[in-house]
Amino acid sequence: MKSINTNQICAIIFILLISNKLLVLPSILYDSTRNDSILFIIGILLIDLAIIMLFAYTNKKFGNTTFVQKSYQVFGKIITKILLAIILIYFLLKIYITLKETENFLNTTIYIDLSSVIFILPCIVVLFYVVSKGLNNVARVTEIFSILILIGIVASLILAVPNVQLDGVLPLFTSSAGDVWESLTKASMWFGNYIILFMFVGHVKVEKHYYKKMLVSFFVGFAIIVLLFTFFYCIFGSSSVIHHFAISDITSFTPSLSSHTKIDWFTVLFYSFADIIQLILQLFVIVYICKEIFQKSFGFWFYAICSIVSILFYTYAPFGFDFIVQLGSVTLGFASLIINVSTVLWFYIVFTIKKKKAQLDDSKKSQLLKNKNLFVKKVDRRVV
């Protein structure tokens, strides 16, 4: 059953593009590729565009068939479930990193002392409640909040314009191949959100201007990310590496905007909504994968127990923000790159190899039918 309309999947694409790229990522990339990080992010986003279009084409081509169903047919249930388990663990890490990033963001920009319990308790309750209501509800929430998030981010960018010195992005093309590779591995945990889209194949309605709306959604997100990176490096230059919250720092750390502090808080709150929506989408995929692995639906007690375990783990796990950033960008950087690339390959194989196999199967069935008809004719002649 198709649960998402075209406008809703466009809102999801927009959120997946921007939600975890406007905080610590600009400073992480600047450490490796300096101003060339702008060119790097443009290149990565264009790759994302190709993958999004692959998703759009596949969803339209294969109707109600889902990615997991196709994978069962090509790789079998055991291998598919192993691959899904890897994706599940990967997104658990992504959720944890996003939560830590968001908590530190709020603690640094708005709150004086935000305890982990006060932060995680409402977050987990909201996340599991929205996800428990199903895909249609997740899509509607994303669609509604995406407009508000867009307004908040655009307001931040407009406020930062007077402080932008365009020569701050120069010089360009100074990074070596080794620098680019370092950025690619360091930033991989903050990319790969398109994996969530793969799980939506077969659930998205193909409506009027299907491709055009997705392209508009992508390029709005693309423009926001590129502008944010450009403004950030133009304002802070070589000190960009020490500013971990780009979306708020471009306004709160500039003297001429000191009188606009409340507006800055306003945009910070809206960007926090973007992180929450991304967490909802990530959690939805985790629950979806659990359903596929265990072949069952989950009720109240599953969500209640998971909520309690999540709150306890997040509250008492001895991992700070700096450790988590190091974990995502260095320790697990190459592993996340492998998962991002191999998942696209997995998706491509499932929807191409199976197609050829199906055509071969149809050919065999046709030949068997011809042989059967010939056999029946021979028998009829003998009987006569």
Image (spheres, grey):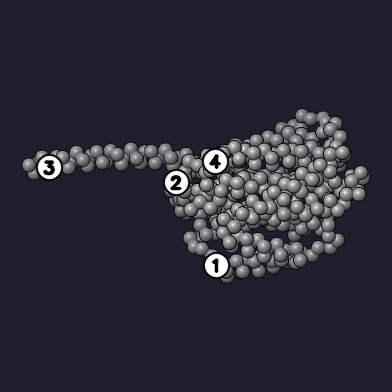
Q: Do residues under tags 1 and 3 come within 8 Å of each other at their CB atoms?
A: no
Q: Give how far across and how far down residue 186 sits, in percent.
A: 71, 44
Query: How far is disc 2 from disc 1 in space, using C-alphas?
Result: 31 Å
Query: How far is disc 4 from disc 2 in space, using C-alphas?
Result: 32 Å
Q: Please identify, in this view, whether the residue under mark 2 or under mark 3 is nearer the observer.
A: 3
How many neighbours does mark 1 have within 10 angstroms: few (below 14), some (14-19), or many (20 or more)?
few
Q: How many marks?
A: 4
Lower position in the chain sequence, tag 4 or tag 1 = 4
Query: How far is disc 1 from disc 3 in space, using C-alphas?
Result: 59 Å
Give the number of the disc on residue 348. Answer: none
Give the number of the disc on residue 380. Answer: 3
Camera-side residue: 162 or 335? 162
Does 140 sit above or below residue 126? above
At 24% from the left and 38% from the top, the residue drawn is 370
Does 170 sit above or below residue 315? above
At 28% from the left and 38% from the top, the residue drawn is 367
According to the picture, the residue beneath numbered tag 4 turns out to be 208
Does 91 sit above or below residue 225? below
